[in-house]
Amino acid sequence: MSENKSQNLFLRHNLPILLILLCPPTAILIWYTNEQLGGSFLELGKKFMDDGFFNALWDIWGPVFWGSKTAWAILGIFAAVELVLLKVLPGKKKPGTTTAGGFTPIYRDNGFLAFLASLLLFAGCSWGLGWFSPTILYDHFGELLGALNVFSLLLCVALYFKGRYAPSGPDHGITGNLIFDYYWGTELYPYIGSLNFKHFINCRIAMMSWPLLLVSFAAHQHETFGITNAMIVVVGLQMIYLGKFYLWEIGYMRSMDIQVDRAGFYIIWGIMVWLPSVYTANTHYLAGYNTDIAWPWAVLIFVVGTVSILLNYAADLQRQRFREKDGKVKIWGKDPVAIHASYINDKGEKKQSLLLASGWWGIARHFHYIPEWLGAVCWTLPCMFNHLLPWFYVIFLGILLVHRSVRDEERCSLKYGKFWDDYKKRVPYKILPGVF
């Protein structure tokens, strides 16, 4: 077998199987390690050594495998509320990126209002009306992950068949490899009626669960130990990051991930299960312990983290406005350095695109990844260095961003050809100037 065939077999078959089998138990093990073992991977390893691999795995996963009635009720109510907020809150309709098949998705730009409304509803119904304890998500976190895992795996089956037999638009298809098609998805933008399913799942279910989990974790620490400086910094920085995300939500829906990744296990399971498990791991860790930092360090970390998050937002917003204004804007007080790139789409039509090579985008081709990663470092630093688990997201994010830069480089090189070569000459570094 040739080297190319071996590589294709790994990427199209072996790697998807590996990720489908390993990721769900990993998400549960991260929760359990925080919940029962104080965040110690060493203690987790000891349990597997003492009990045997499969016995230990079932002892951990079995009690929460199917979720619980409470967990399913929470998820159902949450999804219904977010659907109502998406539909009723005011917001201009804005276009996404036109796909290779010629389809342009339209989004209602009310994400930030939904973010604020979700937090206010959670606080009002728990602390205000007393309908449930604010710690409810912490108390049932393992069951919620179990329910989300089962639901996501089955949902990916449904989306596989929908994309194959009842697609919503022109951007769909199969490779003939069942495992890969389940993993990658068969449809780029599945719709249920007028509902853009990828937008709803990504932004209004998965991402919106993140701030609510933070509030519930902080409430648990407050009830157990009293709120700490460390928790204030960790939650505060993530709330700023999430507020920034929802202000830029339409920009995210125009990003490479959304344009390229179909609605399969990779993105649907990843955003619905991996995100709440891994992205909140540091806050979940803090919730169970009275770990704290001195006020001067708390203020310094908070300031550095806030500046990093705002720099990331400034870079994304700069490019977004450059494209919306067709390059007719000032970048740092000067006319932008723009490359007018042409390309041929899947229909054989010649199209035009503008590449920004000044401002933040003249420093490095993906310079905005640096402040994004530094923001995550800052909201993890208060967890200190007793265990590796709170740093799992920082490590994962670093790998993800480097991998994303490579994917984007390959995609842009194929799409723009000589114009991308010109851009690379003007902006020679991928992420870190002078290094990479």
Image: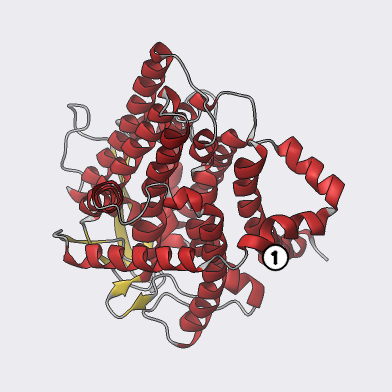
Percent position of residue 115, x then y: 27, 50
Q: Residues within 10 Å of mark 1 (few under 14, many from 20)?
A: some
Label 1: which residue? 17
Q: In the rendered view, would you say 6 is above or below 337?
A: below
In the orientation shown, which residue stands out farthest toward the front? 130
Percent position of residue 170, x then y: 38, 78
Type of amino acid under label 1: Ile
What's the residue at 30%, 81% (across, down)? 193
Considering the image in quadrants, where does the N terminus appear?
Answer: bottom right
Percent position of residue 394, x then y: 54, 35
In the orientation shown, which residue stands out farthest toward the top? 296
Q: Is residue 38 left or right of residue 259?
A: right
Task: For residue 276, say whether it is visible.
Answer: yes
What's the residue at 55%, 67% (across, down)? 184
What's the residue at 48%, 62% (across, down)? 261
Quarter of the view holding residue 143: bottom right
- Coloration mode: secondary structure
Considering the image in quadrants, where does the C terminus appear?
Answer: top right
Of 389 and 37, the residue lying toward us: 37
Q: Is residue 192 left or right of residue 404?
A: left
How many numbered marks are there? 1
Of 210 and 190, the residue lying toward us: 210
Q: In the rendered view, would you say 118 is above or below 10?
A: above
Q: In the rendered view, would you say 427 is above or below 90?
A: above
What's the residue at 35%, 32% (across, down)? 236
Q: Secondary structure at mark 1?
A: helix
Percent position of residue 266, x then y: 55, 61
Task: For residue 254, say whether it is visible.
Answer: no
Of 328 and 342, the residue lying toward us: 328
